[in-house]
Image (cartoon, rainbow, N blue to C red):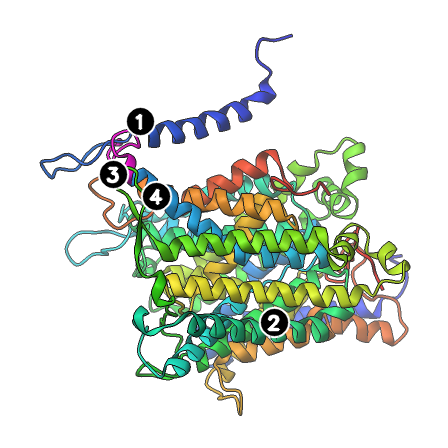
Amino acid sequence: MPLLDIRLLPKLAAAGLVLFAVLYVLVIAEPPPLDGSFGDWRTTTYGSATDDPGSFLLILLDALTFAGLLFIVASGFSLIFGLMRVVNMAHGSFYLLAGYIAYEVQQRMTGLGGFAIAGVDVSTWEWVLPVIIAAAIVAVVGLVVQQFLLSWNQGQDLRQALITIAVSVIVADQVIAHFPRQGVVQVGGGNAVSLTWPGWTERRIDLQVWNVDYSLARLVMLALGVSVGIALWLWLYRTRTGKVIRAGVDDPQMTSALGINIQKTFAIAFVVGAALAALGAAVGTSQGNVASGQDAQWLLNSLVVVIVGGMGSLLGAAAGALLYALVLTFSAAYLPITSDNCCSQYSIVLTFVLIVLVLAFRPQGLFGRAG
Amino acid sequence: MRARLDPKGTSERLIALALLVLLVLGPAFFNDYWVNTILTQMFIFGIAAASLIFLSAYGGMTSLAQTALMGISAYLIGNMVTKGGAGGETKGLTLGWDPTLALVLALGITTVIGVIFGLVAARSLGIYFLMLTLTYGVIANYFFGQVTQFGGFSPIAGINQYTPGFIGEIVGHPDKLYYIGLGASLAVYAAIRYLVRTPFGLSLQGVRDDPVRMTSLGYNVPLHRALAFGFASFVAALSGILLVWWDGQIAPGNIGLAATIELLVIAVIGGLARIEGAWLGAFAFIVINNYVRDVELPVIGGSFNTIIGLIFLVIVIFSPDGLMGIWDRLWRSRGRRGGGTPEAASVTRQAAPEASSP
């Protein structure tokens, strides 16, 4: 028996890589030199976590709250796949559509115009109702797609994926042709606009550690993500509909044979999945903005979350969202700064590394079932 | 088998011969716009679509990474050949290397990247493979947009000024690129037809049909998939190089999600089950693109993408095997022998193993 099994090498390399990344953030990183010169490979924006724990905490909170948003969007994608084996490539386009609808409704409700409205002018109701309307419209679009385009070719998964790609092209193009409608100079064109959080979220909370205060809106984003997770868990594991859905995931033929209308269950899952894309879009649009091109961004985000976490698993979506958010946020903050890359962002490389690391050991994702 | 009359095969061969003669003599009687724009583009995107269809028809892997691989080879050659300095190119590394060396390196490196992509994706099947390769594609797009050393958001231009010595000047000689495209298309077609008859190609089709059985027979299934992906990456890299020679520039927008979907549309319009469909689909797509681009849709509005999306939807719903599938079905409905190449399965109609079929 050799001292070191050669098959362990990739695992050791992966463990070494992860350990290095953690050590880099914790102790190795250094803040930029005081004389304004460019540093070496250890130079980062904030320095290591032990040097500057306040910044570290802020970045960690940024990652956690972004994970909440990622989870809301990706859980809808994962739910649809888990039950129906449909990869809804139109998920990103649904996000785009919902973001613009919520913006339009809020503009009309408040009677104010522009890229975004000031938070003080927005009551809680003026945020919640646009979100509900956007979710309802997108859910109907999802239902139409499912009933007319997907219900008759169940099981032909590649063909269904191609159909949703066609839908995504059409929906994204139509959204860009017709939105935004008001508050901007030009109708259509997919310019960036933003939904506004209710006024009471526009303040910072003093966390009482390391002089850190943190945006309440981002904490609300995390709370919404956790609430969606809990609600989905209760729905799937504590109600009869949830039981039927889980039975449908495990064995659709047997479930139908027991006299359960599995088509109805599929339709419910698609409606909920599309509505989750809409809720995620409302949150994402409030925190940032919505603009043409974000359909690709959010399709990528959903894909990475479910590829890493495992398809069709609620826990997987949560784990995938957390890991992906950590990698994105920390790589943006802690990658070294050197002289000649003022404008380069390498965090996309680490996204790829994350996928490779997970798939090398678990091709089905962290919590996905084999096969 | 050979002794039997094969009207479908014979007529296909006759049509192919007639088309070949037409294309070889093409520049003599097509106008410049057709030669430079439509037919040359047809060759370029036909080659890229052929790499997608090869993987789909013979490997059972529908890849959305082919556009990204085109872009990687285009970016590699763009960074290697262009020269910086006063009046030179400002984007990218501007290494100014010998174009022949750059050509070999771009093809080689892209193939190696393809094998690595393939190794990572080799254990993901069916729809997972589609998602993973789409992720590769979107990541490559963001990579070239965000890492400014290799180009950044705006294009690397003027790449077609630097062509290998054995090809010579391309700018101002559109016929030359036309014949390079034609020759490369024929070479790719012949290479794929040859490859699928080799022992590797046959075991690859075994892997497509029954990976579990092939594993128990002792074949290395992930390796077969990764090597097939590497070959398809080489073909995609070739088309990427032709694309920069034709267009002269490469930008992240050339390899974005829209471009990825366009290549998929080309392959699906042509037909995912037969290699010939690649060029047929490219021809159909480019003609539509050139002549329908400015048509305004009544009532719903929107741009060319809505039209392409609708065409794509109709094709997938009514003829998932594309135009080649319609051709095959016409022969089958005449009640004669033929109807689909025996070695290429209809990928889009395959049911997922665990899902129910109504």
Residue A46 is labelled as 3
The residue labelled by disc 2 is A139
Amino acid type indicated by mark 2: Ala
Of A302 and A99, nearer the camera is: A99
Q: Mark 4 lies on which chain?
A: A
Question: Helix, strand or loop at disc 4?
Answer: helix
Looking at this rendering, what residue extends furthest in the left direction?
A35
Q: How would you rate the neighbour count of disc 1 (Cα within 10 Å): few for under 14, some for 14-19, many for 20 or more?
A: some
Residues in magenta?
A41-54
Q: Nearer the viewer, mark 4 or mark 1?
A: 4
Which is nearer the N-term, disc 4 or disc 2?
4
Q: How far apart are the alpha carbons under marks 1 and 2? A: 48 Å
The residue labelled by disc 4 is A59
Query: Is residue A329 toward the left or the right of residue B148 in the image?
Result: right
Task: Respond whether the residues carrying marks 3 and 4 are from the same subunit.
Answer: yes
Cβ atoms under marks 3 and 1 closer than 8 Å = no
